[in-house]
Image (cartoon, rainbow, N blue to C red):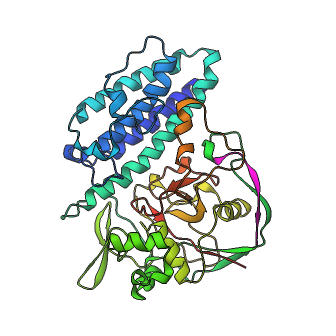
Amino acid sequence: MTTENSHIQAYQSIRGITEALCQPLAIEDYVIQSIDDTSPPKWHLAHTTWFFETFLLTQMLKEYTPFHPQFQYLFNSYYQGIGDFYPRVKRGLLSRPTVEEISAYRRHVDDHMLELLHTLRDEDTTTMNSLLTLGLNHEQQHQELLLMDIKHNFSIHPDHPVFNAIKSTQLVTPPGKLQMIPVAGGVIEIGYQGNDFCFDNELPRHKQILRPYQIATRLVTNAEYCEFIADNGYQTPQWWLADGWDYAQKHHWQAPLYWQKMNGKWFVFTLNGLQELNPHEPVAHVSYYEADAYARWKQVRLPTEAEWEHFTTSQKIKADSGHFMESGIFHPQTASTNEETPRQFFGDLWEWTCSSYSPYPGYKPLNGALGEYNGKFMSSQMVLRGGCCATPASHVRASYRNFYQPEKRWQFSGIRLASDI
């Protein structure tokens, strides 16, 4: 297959997946925004299209005419170098452009992207390859965000609507006792190493010193987290960071997001509707504050991102070995019963680390407006690793750094424990 054909195939495949994810939606579902953190599905469809139009078509295709002059303002997310943008918290107030118009926008941009891919000159190929790959990885990020946002948008409805018809098939056998694997530590290297795509925040590869540590074989389960709740974990300030305690009290947290108690039993909202809580599943949709409090209650801690990456690479754990978006389940699965085997490092749930999101030594953001993609968010956020059940499998690698503010929990996030030796 020629490079041109492989680019076309990748572009059409990834763009098609985004639209396929939206197929279960009713037309009204495309518009709502349940909280400030989420975006309406139609905004995701338009923004990912805006990305290709702004960074590729207007720059590289002669005589390209943008689909609509107002879309530059409506669907820019946060790129100050491009221009002003419509406030994020008000995206759900826009009934126009319609879903039909946004579909036409996607077709318009797709047609011109295929024209661009067919007509590139050799001297443009390197730049185009870089921008196209970034755009496709950006679209994959929004595929996960779509599922996260749809889940929250649906969760506020009292009838607990079902988005996904594929039910989770869970193991009924407990995953076994959580084990800790000792690691010697030493002078190690982290950061992306290879010739394929990575985000700028994964570079440069650099050395770090790790003290001996141990890391859990699997994620913390719902049953284990219920013990924290039963022991008044949400009412005991000694386990919580000060900001976390204040936030939890202000927002009346008593359990992870999407949990609700009925007739003495815990239930959890999923993309397959409301389900009775499976005690063997990994606990999901917890904030960093909750993950940290649970670890303190267990008298251990969360892993650093260097420990997490060092362990997965030294153990040669394959990044595509986990449970990802392609299963169509969009819900974390129970761990296997092999107690001593490292499990669930990739897929199922993003794993909170105790590392703040900051630049690696020698970090350099991309040039121009694309330098805003990652670098300007390196403040007041925590790093998560490993991907989740809504992440495309091809999108994740050991060096991948996700990041959220410590109070956020609408993302598919979970807990892996670690400790010093």
Q: Is residue 334 visible?
A: no
User: From this viewpoint, is residue 110 visible?
Assistant: yes
Instruction: Using residue 107 as the reference point, say whether residue 404 is left or right of it.
Output: right
Q: Residue at x 49, y 63 (%)?
A: 349
Residue 47 x %, y % = 38, 36
Q: Choose between 272 and 30: the one closer to the eye.
A: 30
**Callout count:** 0
Q: Which residues are magenta?
A: 202-211
For the residue pair 230 and 357, the one nearer the viewer reads as: 357
Residue in the image at 43% along x and 26% along y = 53
- Answer left or right for 252 relative to 378: left
Q: Residue at (30%, 55%) from the top-left corner?
A: 35
Query: Can residue 214 be found in the magenta stretch?
Result: no
Q: Nearer the viewer, residue 287 or 376?
A: 376
Residue at left offset 64%, top offset 52%: 399
How far across and how far down the image is residue 357, in percent?
A: 58, 55
Q: Residue 40, relative to residue 285: is it above or below?
A: above
